[in-house]
Amino acid sequence: MSLLQIEQLSLRFGAQARAVVSELALSLNAGEKLALVGESGSGKSVLARAILRLDSDVCASGRMIFDGISLLDASPVQLRTIRGRRIAMIFQEPMTALNPLQTIGQQIAEVLHLHGGYSPKAQRQRVLELLHRTGISDAEQKLRRYPHQLSGGQRQRVMIAMALAGEPELLIADEPTTALDVTVQAQILTLLADIQRERGMAVLLISHDLNLVRRFADRVAVMRHGRVVETAPVAELFAAPSHPYTQQLLAARPQRIAMPASPSRAEPCLSARQLSHAYRQDAPAWQFWRQHWQTILAPLDLTLQAGETLAIVGESGSGKTTLALSLLRLLQAGRGGGTLTVAGRDFSALSGAALRAARRDIQMVFQDPFAALSPRMNVGEIVAEALLVHEPAATAAERADRVAQVLQEVGLDSALMSRYPHEFSGGQRQRIAIARALILKPRILILDEPTSALDATVQLQVLQLLADLQRLHGLSYVLVSHDMAVVRALAHRVLVLKAGIVQEAADVEPLFTQPRSDYTRQLLSAMF
């Protein structure tokens, strides 16, 4: 008897719109691990949200039965008893799914309060246990932090802890390891597998990471254009895929696409000396007069030449994003040190209007494009916004021409300028984020996990786009990534961070073939 049975399901945004999921059939048994794979925009996440009836503007037809309950006919009261308790979901973009006004401890405790009947004392103990199980160190301290105070990987683990808090019968995991490094990915997969075995829980895993799917799933369903084109046991599908699209997905692997970096004696376009950052921590009550500081980034040196890509790698929480934000002088909280030179200017000495003007030379593509793009602005307004700040004398027609040109460079039609971010797939949103960074013609782009949320085929497209843009404009990249395959494809040099401390710095090929530090070897062994 299937725990979840889907038959002839069609989903569309608006009664007259084109179906994003068409006549889909899928079944999931109790205790089974089913992986749903497919390219960005194939309908995977729309289907996952439809199971929980989370999108009120989605028109659905067909049948969707969960343990004898018709989800399409369920009342709001019935759905409230199912959501979070019987069916839980790990969302793809934790920064948009978590409440920015509540601490992570409060958000996990809310699930326990609504569905578990825990006392306040028992709630706290259970929250700490869930945080420990999902691999968050210093759970006592993290309990009181807000989502923006955590790294991308830590926020993802908080989402997993929230989903497991209700001890569901079905867990829908929408890209649960997107923001996690390879070592933590293995830990999370082991955790989910252990809990799944203990409770006989069914798992619907949505992922673009085929290596992860191969290690975790029992069966695989492949989606394309809103339809399931192939379903098979995992060993059978990977050994002998029958559908051409499945064969295409399995063949998609990042290849070395970076042009060889030319040796340069010119002054680096970016140089940091003894760059560091620390955050203030709450002191114990009996030491209220003392200031406690936690070092996130130990003093380090780095340089970046024109046309070069420097990769920053390390596990979640190692200080990669803190380093990226420090290079842009975007960190307001805490205290930092060191000197920073960008395009020949002392960046660390600038402030106010002078700092804003200098930032046109160094732009950033953020890890989560959906959170970084304003939902109240259309694409044309988002991409043109920087021109209003840095080139206020430009006319509306000139701005429109610049926006159309940069959208074309990143592979998007200028006719899409009137659409909003939620109307695009993950890969398209990432291209919009790149276009917004390019509109000012910067010399340096900081890429914070630019392909972490993308499937294999779209990942290749974005990597090729970045390599082409680098050749076309002579751009320099600081690439922050946990994906060593992406690093090998695009980077020229690599800086390895652990707990804010540089473990190793080397050219990309020597680092991959003869790593010097044990930690680098650990990262590489988890990759292969």
Image (cartoon, helix red, strand yellow):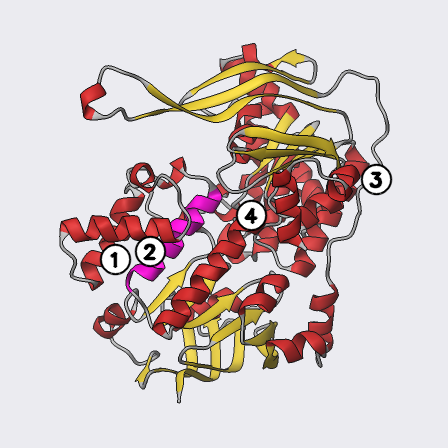
Type of residue at label 3? Met
Q: Which residue is mark 3?
A: 259
* The quadrant where residue 360 appears: top right
State the residue position of label 4: 181
Q: Which residue is located at x 35 percent, y 60 percent?
A: 163
Residue contact at pointers 3 and 4, CB within 8 angstroms: no
N-terminal of the two: label 3 or label 1? 1
Please tell me whether mark 1 sits on a helix, a strand or a loop.
helix
Q: Is residue 505 shown above or below 13?
A: above
Crowding near the residue tagged with mark 2, few <14, some 14–19, many ≥20 C-alpha atoms within 10 Å: many
Mark sitting on residue 139: none
What residue is pinned by disc 1? 111
Q: Residue furthest bottom?
A: 1
Residue appearing at x 41%, y 39% in the figure: 150
Q: Which residues are magenta?
A: 152-166
Give the left or right position of residue 258, taking residue 350 as reference.
Answer: right
Helix, strand or loop for disc 2: helix
The answer to whether 181 is drawn above or below residue 391 in the figure is below
Mark positioned earlier in the residue sequence (3 or 4): 4
Circle 3 Cα neighbour tier, 10 Å, few/some/many (<14 / 14–19 / ≥20): some
Residue 439 seen: no
The CA distance from mark 3 to mark 4 is 26 Å
Q: Quadrant of the C terminus?
A: bottom right
Residue 253 coordinates in the image, percent (x, y): 73, 58
In the rendered structure, are the residues bearing label 2 and label 1 in contact, judged by CB atoms less than 8 Å apart?
yes
Percent coordinates x, y for residue 223 in the rendering: 59, 73
Compared with 173, 105 (above or below) is above
Specify the amino acid type for callout 4: Asp
Residue drawn 73% across and 32% down? 506
The spot of residue 222 in percent (x, y) is: 60, 74
**Which quarter of the picture shows residue 350?**
top right
Which of the two labelled residues, at mark 4 and mark 2, occupies the earlier sequence position? Answer: 2
